[in-house]
Structures are given as structure tokens and as C-alpha cells.
Image: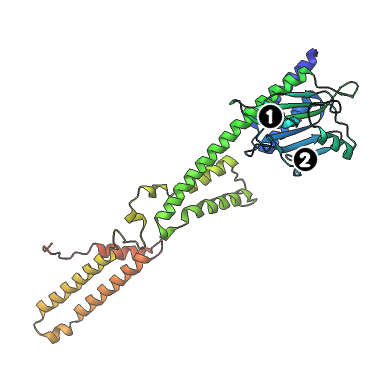
Amino acid sequence: MKLSEAQLKHLFKTLTDVSILLSTEKNHDRLLEIILTKAKEITNADGGTLYTVTENKTLKFEIMLTTSLDIHIGGTSGQRMQMSDLPLYNEQSEPNTKMVAPWAAVSRQTINIKNVYTNKKFDLSGPKIFDKKTGYHSQSFLTVPMTNHLNEVIGVLQLINAIDSKTKKIIPFSKFDQHVVESLASQAAVIISNRELIIAQRKLFDSLIQLIAKAIDEKSPYTGGHCRRVPVITRMIAEAACKADKGPLKDFTMTDEELYELEVAAWLHDCGKITTPEAVVDKATKLAGIQDGIHLVDARFEILKRDAIIESFIKHTDLQEIKEDKVLEEKLLTLDKERDMIHHSNIGGEQMLPEQLEQINAIANRKWLGPRGK
């Protein structure tokens, strides 16, 4: 097939545009649709189907397009495929040699059928049944395996009924059509595989950071679930801010990548707790160490009360005078109140009033005599 200079320029531009579209498109369904649509456009095919290879060794129908029947199923159409997957192997684990698309995938060969109704090699009952139901006439088929850079077949691209641009009649797919579609299918397979690798890498990274967050939550039952709740709440706040149409946030926007970065930061906001001693992280109260420090504080208050009583004994020789010592009574009452306040603060919330902080600092600065008289 000899192309004019204008046709070659158009083909080159189309292939260049396809390369750009495939490399920039992030939506999986749109990506597959671009591959099939552009393959149809390049070969002037009336219809086409794109399959992907599944983990169960079958071909899954992804998209079906037929221009003359105005059929658009799968992809971005919103209409789900109702067709069953095509097996690549039979029950004896032998290659499925009867069906065109599975055999193209298994053999890694392009199959170019000039006429469905005269072909005896393959079971083409499916297209014939489709023709009877719809009044369509399936004739020429071009089935190309999509092979990536690792020489793995990840899908099959099948085009139906090449149309002569002048006569508008159905014609066989030319060798030139076959070479161009093979090139497009290979390029598309590499891009899809790279995209899947990126997605798999992101999933692995997400699993890792979620594992870290779960480990932090498990480390402290008192804040259990905190690391898992923060990302959800953070994303809700960010999305609400992006939707604001008035106020200081009306011009605020975030891209999908920025939202993802924020979500990752939310997952990892407590990652420093991994290396924090368990006595610091796993604490029911503020003064808890290996054991709750409140008991040491209680002991010191008792020492202060003891010192106050001893001081009163020194001043007063009579027991009755000691019992009636108002200064001692006030000191003991004050110490009890301060101890109660420390107990309350130890179990309290995340924030303290300025006057409470001032009172705690005053208590902390108080001097008392230890066992060595210091």
C-alpha cells in the first residue's frame, strides 16, 4: 500500500498525538479507549474491541466500539460489559486455539482474517451470532497482541471491518495497517505496564505507611486509632476547603497529587513515636513513666506535710497548742489542695489554663529536705 505525502504526514501526526495522549493520560479507562479509538482511526475500521489479560488467564472485555451501529460499551461510556471472559487455556491447560483473540494472546501472533464467513481455522460463531441479532456484517478482522517491554502479553486489540475511504466498502486490513497497529499496540502495552508499575509502587508505599501508622496505634492503647483517623479527617477538611465558593478559601484549590501528599503527611504525622520510648508513648497519665510518677509526687507532699508538723512541734511544746496551730492547719490544707490539683492535671485534657500552669510551676520550685538534708 502506497501512501501519498499528505497521508504520511497525517499518519505521522496521528501517531505523535497518540504518543502524547497515552503518556499523559492518567485515567485507566480513558487510556484504553484512546488506544482503541486511535487504532480505529488509523486503519479506518468500523469497529473494535480491546481485551486485557487477567490473573485467571482469561481475556476480559474492556471496551467495544462500532461506529455504524453507534455502539460504545465499557470504557468511559458508563455501560458495563455483560460478556463473559474468554479463556486462554482449556480445562486440560492447553492453549485455546479455536478462538481468535485468545490464540493471538497465547501465540503472540497477529491474526489478519480477510473474511469471517470463509475462514475455517477459527471458531467465529460469536461474530456470526452478533450479525444475526443486529443485522451487522462482520467481514475483516485484525487481532493484535499487546506485548510490553518484558515480552509479556497484557491485552489484545481487535479491529473489525476496514472501510475503503473512497468506495466505503468493507476491505481486508492491509499489511501496512497491520504493521502500524502492531507498533501502536506495543507502544500502548509498554505505557500501560509502566502505569501499572507506578500504581503498584504507590500501593506498596501506601501499605507501608499504613503499616507504620497501625504499629504506632498498637503501641499505645490510649490513643488507639488516632493515626488512622487523622488522614480521613484531614482529607475531609481539604476537600471541603476546595469546595468553598465564598470566604477566605474561595480561591483555594488542590490537585490530586497535592491531596495525596497531604494524606501521606497525615498518615506519617506521628512517625516519630516509633523511636520514642514506650514509657513515654504508652502512658495513661501525664506523669506516667515506667510507673506513674504521681506516687513520687504524693510522697513529696507527705514529706512537706511532715516537715510542717515537725516545725510546729519545735515551736510549740504543748500538744494542745500544736492541735490549735492555725498556720499548720492552713499549710496542711494548702498542700492537700495542691496535691489534688496535681492529680487532676495528671489525668486532664490536652490543654491547661495559664493560672494552672503558673500554680504547677510554683509547686515545682518549692524546696524540701531530702534524706541527706539537701
Disc 1: which residue: 105
Determine whether 118 is above or below 365 in the image.
above
- Looking at numbered disc 2 in the image, what kind of residue is underneath it? Ile
Q: Quadrant of residue 280?
A: bottom left
Q: Quadrant of residue 327?
A: bottom left
At horizontal 11% and vertical 62% (from top left) the residue drawn is: 372
Q: Position of residue 284 (x, y in %)?
A: 37, 62
User: Who is closer to the viewer here, 212 or 110?
Assistant: 110
User: Who is closer to the viewer here, 275 or 348?
Assistant: 275
Spatial CA distance of label 1 from label 2 is 22 Å
Of all residues shown, which one is farthest toward the front? 92
First in residue order: circle 1 vs circle 2: 2
SS under mark 2? strand
Determine whether 342 is above or below 215 in the image.
below
Q: Which mark is residue 73?
A: 2
Q: Position of residue 134 (x, y in %)?
A: 88, 39
Q: Is residue 214 left or right of residue 54?
A: left
- Give the tally of numbered discs: 2
At horizontal 71% and vertical 29% (from top left) the residue drawn is: 103
- Looking at numbered disc 1 in the image, what kind of residue is underneath it? Ala
Q: Position of residue 203 (x, y in %)?
A: 54, 41
Q: Quadrant of the N terminus?
A: top right
User: Who is closer to the viewer here, 201 or 88?
Assistant: 88
Determine whether 290 is above or below 328 in the image.
above
Q: Quadrant of the C terminus?
A: bottom left
At horizontal 54% and vertical 39% (from top left) the residue drawn is: 202
